[in-house]
Image (tube, rainbow, N blue to C red):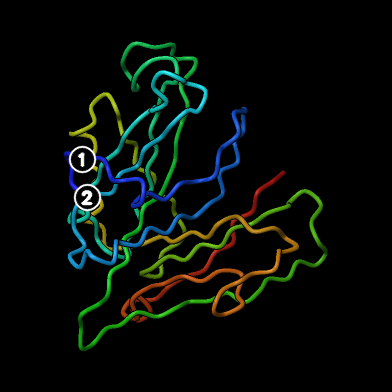
């Protein structure tokens, strides 16, 4: 995958369709594996946002991020503003129709080291007593370096795309801490299918454990 050519359909992973309402619920994690014939993990992540109701040009925005710029196991949290009635933020279009799009990106790569390796931090379950009536879902977060939870959202300005993205990448590469967040989980969890039978798990280098990690629960008041 290169900057000048959009990935082929066979190399794309599609998200679920997000409902068009005031409080859209997008609760999905996408795993993109490099093609078997590609041994060198390079090129670009492409994030393509589409609106199925726009017949002529369904694309709302395209974000391309070079893999070489991303620190493995250090998620980046993005927020950008798109305008379905016009172009990108800051260009022609009705500002009242702006939609905010948030996503996170994490690169996982094999660790070639004699002193470090990957490990799993699995959370087997939670217990609510009594079961809350106004909290239907929760999420679990893990932070490194023994720091309290903070969601470091980076604002990507689509009207000044190149400079804004470059600044986000610089901040990302200078950071020495990571925040990982699970998907939203129901307080009465659905059956899970993973190698641990756990609610969720985080894949991190063992060296992160030596620096110290913290676990947090985030609740959603519904």
146 sits left or right of 217 in the view: left
116 sits left or right of 140 in the view: left
207 sits left or right of 42 in the view: right
Name the element at disc 1. loop
Q: How many marks?
A: 2
Residue farthest bottom in this picture: 114
Question: In the rendering, at what x and y percent does residue 222 appear?
Answer: 72, 43
Nearest to the observer: residue 49 or residue 122: 49
Res 91 → quadrant:
top left
Question: In the rendering, at what x and y percent does residue 41 appear?
Answer: 21, 62
Which residue occupies 47% across, 26% down? Answer: 99
Looking at the picture, does residue 92 appear above or below residue 170? above
Looking at the picture, does residue 127 appear above or below residue 115? above
152 sits left or right of 149 in the view: left
Give the spatial CA distance, label 2 vs label 1: 7 Å
Looking at the picture, does residue 202 appear above or below residue 50? below
Tags 2 and 1 touching, CB below 8 Å: yes
Question: In the rendering, at what x and y percent does residue 200 appear?
Answer: 56, 69
Which residue occupies 81% across, 61% down? Answer: 131
What crowding class fits label 1: few (fewer than 14 Cα within 10 Å), some (14-19), or many (20 or more)? few
| Mark sitting on residue 1 | 2
| Mark sitting on residue 180 | none
Name the element at disc 2. loop
Which residue occupies 61% across, 77% down? Answer: 197
What crowding class fits label 2: few (fewer than 14 Cα within 10 Å), some (14-19), or many (20 or more)? some
Which residue occupies 20% across, 83% down? Answer: 113
Question: In the rendering, at what x and y percent does residue 43 appear?
Answer: 19, 52
Which residue, given by chain and number where applicable, does mark 1 sit on? 5
């Amino acid at each position: 995958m290169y900057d000048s050519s959009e990935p082929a359909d066979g190399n794309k992973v599609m998200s679920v369709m997000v409902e068009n309402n005031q409080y859209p619920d997008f609760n999905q994690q996408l795993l993109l594996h490099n093609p078997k014939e590609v041994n060198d993990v390079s090129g670009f992540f492409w994030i393509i946002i589409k609106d199925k109701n726009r017949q002529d040009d369904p694309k709302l925005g395209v974000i391309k991020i070079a893999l070489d710029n991303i620190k493995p196991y250090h998620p980046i949290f993005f927020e950008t503003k798109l305008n379905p009635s016009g172009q990108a933020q800051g260009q022609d279009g009705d500002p009242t129709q702006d939609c905010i799009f948030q996503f996170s990106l994490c690169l996982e790569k094999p660790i070639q080291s004699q002193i470090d390796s990957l490990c799993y931090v699995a959370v087997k379950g939670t217990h609510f007593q009594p079961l809350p009536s106004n909290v239907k879902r929760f999420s679990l977060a893990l932070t490194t370096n023994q720091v309290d939870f903070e969601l470091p959202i980076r604002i990507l300005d689509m009207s000044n795309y190149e400079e804004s993205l470059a600044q986000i990448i610089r901040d990302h590469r200078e950071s020495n801490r990571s925040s990982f967040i699970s998907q939203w989980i129901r307080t009465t969890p659905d059956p899970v299918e993973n190698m641990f039978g756990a609610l969720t798990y985080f894949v991190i280098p063992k060296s992160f454990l030596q620096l110290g990690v913290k676990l947090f629960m985030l609740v959603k008041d519904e």
